[in-house]
Amino acid sequence: MNYIGSKHKLSSFLKSSIINTVNSDLSSLVFCDLFAGTGIVGRTFKPLVKQVIANDVERYSYVLNRNYIGNHTSINCEKQIECLNNLVGIEGFIFQNYCEGGNEERLYFSSENGKKIDAIRMQIEKWKTSIEITADEYYFLLASLIESADKVANTASVYGAYLKQLKKTAQKTLLIVPAKFLKTESSHQIFNEDSNDLIKKIKGDILYLDPPYNARQYGSNYHLLNTIAKYDTFLPKGKTGLRDYYKSSYCKKNEVKISFEELIKNANFKHIFLSYNNEGLMSENEVSTILLKYGKYSLKTTNYQRFKADKTENRNHKATETVEYLHILEKHL
């Protein structure tokens, strides 16, 4: 997925920096990705550590991480995938509220794909309710739907708005592609909680933090993925069909420092790594001042091209280069 703040391009930098800093055999350690998003960093460390703890407050993120991190033994859902891809579309909640030809004429998906999403989502829930699939299989299929639907969405990569006409990728027919995960011997923990609440209940060895940098709320930018994940009934608001969404204190200039220090104070982890950048609500100095109160502090940086929503179908635009900070704390416990 094209995802705001995705660490896909930075995964090798993060992996080498964390391994070199911890300087021990990771196979006996617990690694926590507290603001997991699509789970890229947790997936990177999943085969290296004893256990991954992955958390995100957004429901679509929980579904993705429940599959990619939580699932660790073999799953065979080929028949279910084939069945889902052959379903006849239904004019359900997604079609009526977010599609071409629906009641509201919001152009997030083509008419055909909106109906397919409804039919597929209903079938997955039916299998779960009738206990025809396990919990692991449920999240595997649901993650597969979310990622596959995202590939045919008629947006500029985020769901804050839809495009006025269907772009080429949105005209393609939705095809469920299996969201394959890495198998491991050990099990993992997945949460769907506020990070500042969860940090008081967990402990481990390596804590990786990738909170929102700025005022962009993920709940509004990815509201439709939450709606597919939850598949609940509500009254969509405004032109873009927003649902009520969680508002993070890490996206608020007057709250972010208080929440961040509270998180660090309550963290029961020896090694803490914070990804942030030079465009964040907290300055480099503000972050370092807080971390220095709690242990030995150091900093690594790297330049990279940040995510930029594709507002047209011309993908030859010049990406914006930014500086990624990796703040490192060896905490005094």
Image (cartoon, rainbow, N blue to C red):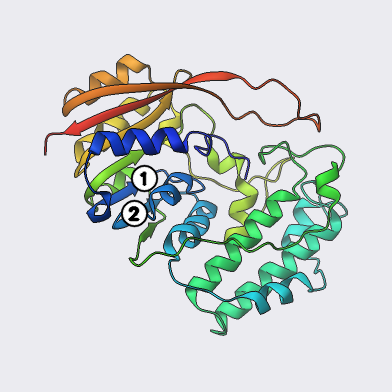
Amino acid under disc 2 = Ile
* Residue at screen point 52% across, 48% down: 38
Q: Label 1 is placed on what type of residue?
A: Leu
Helix, strand or loop at mark 2: strand
Q: Residue drawn 60% across and 44% down?
A: 222
Q: Which residue is mark 2?
A: 53
- Name the one closer to the observer, 57 or 316: 316
Q: Position of residue 84 (x, y in %)?
A: 72, 72
Residue at 45% of width from left, 37% of height from top? Answer: 12
The picture places residue 24, in percent across and down from the top left corner, at 21, 44
Q: CA gap, disc 1 to disc 2?
A: 8 Å
Instruction: Kindly check if marks 1 and 2 are in contact, taking CB atoms under 8 A apart as contact.
Output: yes
- Quadrant location, the C terminus: top left
Could you tell me which secondary element the residue under label 1 belongs to? loop
Q: Which residue is mark 1?
A: 34
The picture places residue 155, in percent across and down from the top left corner, at 74, 40
In terms of image quadrants, where is residue 242?
Answer: top right
Q: Is residue 309 left or right of residue 108?
A: left
